[in-house]
Amino acid sequence: MKTKYRLALLLVSTALVLPLAACQTTSEQASKQDRSERIGAALEQAANDATNAGNTEESLALLERSYKRDSSNMALATKYAHALRMADRLTRAALVLSPFVNDGGDANAAAHIEYAATMAAMGTYAEAETHARQAVLTEPENGQAYHILGIALDAQGYHPQAETAFRKGLELWQGDPGPILNNLGLNLATQGFIDEALDTLRKAADVSPNRQEIERNLRIVGALQVQPPKTGMRLIPKPPRKPENKEG
């Protein structure tokens, strides 16, 4: 009788121990996850600080560590790919984002924009256009999506369509509009509307006075304005501005 009582008591005691062990395991797992998240957040913050301080190599190294810890994080992969593109490591940037934006991946606009920018930097403009259009469909109010779409179209020779994309992007733009004004100005110059191109480039220089590429483009387009017509050419030159649409 005593033996049975002891056995029952032992079984009950064992049963009580099991849930406690499970609680300890769950607590340890939560603690590890929390620690991992805090380390990841610290690495990302350090990368942001390095970027703001102009330490691009340090920022890239920190973002790479963060990405390796959590390669399934699309926002982190997008930041890492951007840093790679800025470092001219284009193939690596494309590989990082490809799982998200290709093969039916459910990518957001930011990932498609960064991938499109990488494709444009690699000279693959048709693919850049595809992903820029996907970004526009995903987030129609994103000015950057229209900007990269305009770049991709312009590079393929679709200048009027690119102008439309640039102007739409400018309407929705947030932040310094210097880059998109610069590209719109060059687009207008390519179409032959030199006066309007110069006006647009001057606006770009006003809002972004420290961008040397804008000043350079102003000088180049300004030289086109004063070039004498070539002899023997019978083509009618385009007007310096686009003609206004008049109703009636």
Image (cartoon, helix red, strand yellow):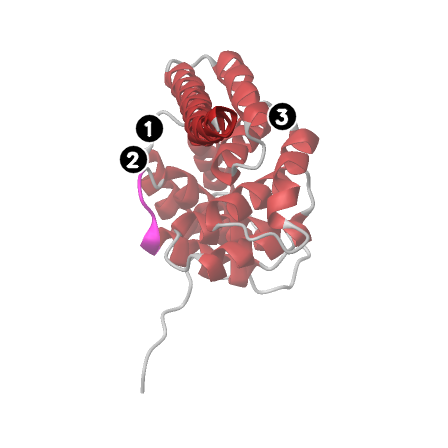
Q: Residue at x 52, y 44 (%)?
A: 111
Where residue 187 appears, as percent x and y from the top left, is 51, 51
Q: Amino acid at mark 1?
A: Pro
- First reached walking from the N terminus: tag 3 or tag 2: 3
Q: Residue at x 49, y 50 (%)?
A: 108
Q: Point out the frontmost of discs 3 and 2.
A: 3
Q: Is residue 174 magenta?
A: yes
Residue tagged 2 = 206
Q: Amino acid at mark 3?
A: Asp
Q: Amino acid at mark 2?
A: Asp
Q: Give the magenta range.
A: 171-175
Element assignment for label 3: loop
Question: For the residues marked 1 and 2, what is the alpha-carbon distance in whole angstroms?
Answer: 6 Å
Q: Residue at x 48, y 43 (%)?
A: 226
Q: Is residue 7 above or below residue 232?
A: above
Residue tagged 3 = 88
Residue 174 numbered tag? none
Where residue 31 appears, as percent x and y from the top left, is 41, 22
Q: Say which quadrant the C terminus sits in.
A: bottom left
